[in-house]
Image: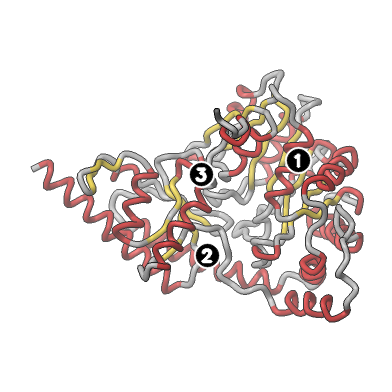
Amino acid sequence: MNLLSKRVLSIEASATSGTAVKAKNLKAKGVDVISFSQGEPDFKTPPYICEAAKQAIDAGNYFSYPPTGGYLDLRTAIAQKYVSENKVPYKTENIVVTNGAKQALSNVMLSILNPGDEVLIFAPFWVSYLAQVKLAGAKPIIIKGAPENDFKVGIQQIKDAISTKTKAIVFSSPCNPTGLVYNKQELEALAELVSNYPNLLVIADEIYEHINYTPHRISFAALPEMFNRTITINGFSKCYAMTGWRVGYLAAPTWLSKEVIKLQGHLTSSNSSIAQRAAFSAINNGLDAVNEMVQEYQKRRDLVYAKLNAIAGIEVNLPSGAFYIFPNISKYYGTWYKGQQINNSIEMCTYLLEIAHIAVVPGAAFGEDACVRISYASPEDDLLEGLKRLKKALGDLEKQKILNLN
């Protein structure tokens, strides 16, 4: 008898976390592994943010449970940030502070979805979208973006996928894993389409909003008629290098935000009190530290893009944001390693980890098996060495292919 629920059996383990674990296990055995697998800044949290946490501890006023939805001053600061930066008229009551943006997304899915509902997901997509939709009892509908269009999904594709069961659309911009950024015209076209469907919601994942190398910085909720139709997902992990602090948030119409707080009260209750004080300092002290990190990310992006373009057989788009690049390596499929044919991104990533000792994430986890995801949130020396290993490992496969043909 199977004692596990159908719910948990319907989902796969996180590919990004799984690859990171394999890399760490090899490192523990003394193997020199270079990991490009996890979406985690290699920068340390800026000192002024850490100092705010220390001061909160020393003050001794933050050792009790915080309010379930987050401290009011932090929620107000987030709302004011959206008013001033994003031109979205959020108020304190629209904001819910969560244990990372991942929980914010899960809270939303559980709060709006019923069995039989459908959610349109733009692919390539972040790995957990599918699992979160399935855990809520709904059905994910995948819409694939074309590589020649920078992996962006077209309006006609979305229109064709909408049915009477469609409850929501979810996408990220800047995007994990491709780094694409939707421009104003593209988002306006999506908003115009959504306005024709009164019961359709949009979940806009903006966790990488400041890691953006373009002038296109549009919050979907700021577009006409979209304030009450949009749930904005964000957090402090990526832009402020605060992954371990686990502070995320969502911004939504009050009819939803109050229900999310109710749900969170039964799941995890509030986010860490000390982490919230750190986040309050982050959001109130400008973006100088963030912009410095973004400049470095852009420099790394250019380096990685150039190196990948120099490898025969790889096709790669120039990312417009985030800190990922998503090269197509499918021309190396059909080659052999240890008597086994490499036919997909999972087998390719296994080969690269075992032979080249570099950890990248299979594109299959993001809905595009032809590609692998490389995070360039790593020091330049690691990037250069890792890409050198990648080039050699793929070159060795190509040599074997030529030998087999002869």
Query: Which numbered dot is residue 108?
Result: 1
Closest to the camera, between mark 3 and mark 1, is: 1
* Quadrant hosting residue 4: top right
For residue 278, side relative to residue 212 (left or right)? right
Label 1, residues with CA under 10 Å away: few <14, some 14-19, many ≥20: many
Whole-number angstrom distance, CA of label 3 to CA of label 1: 28 Å
Query: Which numbered dot is residue 150?
Result: 3
Lower sequence index among marks 2 and 1:
1
Closest to the camera, between mark 3 and mark 2, is: 2
Which x, y percent locates residue 357? Answer: 35, 62
Label 2, residues with CA under 10 Å away: few <14, some 14-19, many ≥20: many
For residue 272, side relative to residue 316 (left or right)? right
Above/below status of 385 relative to 185: below
For residue 70, side relative to residue 378 (left or right)? right
Which x, y percent locates residue 131? Answer: 61, 38
Which x, y percent locates residue 173? Answer: 64, 48
Identify the residue shown where x is 53% and y is 40%. Answer: 12
Residue tagged by mark 2? 377
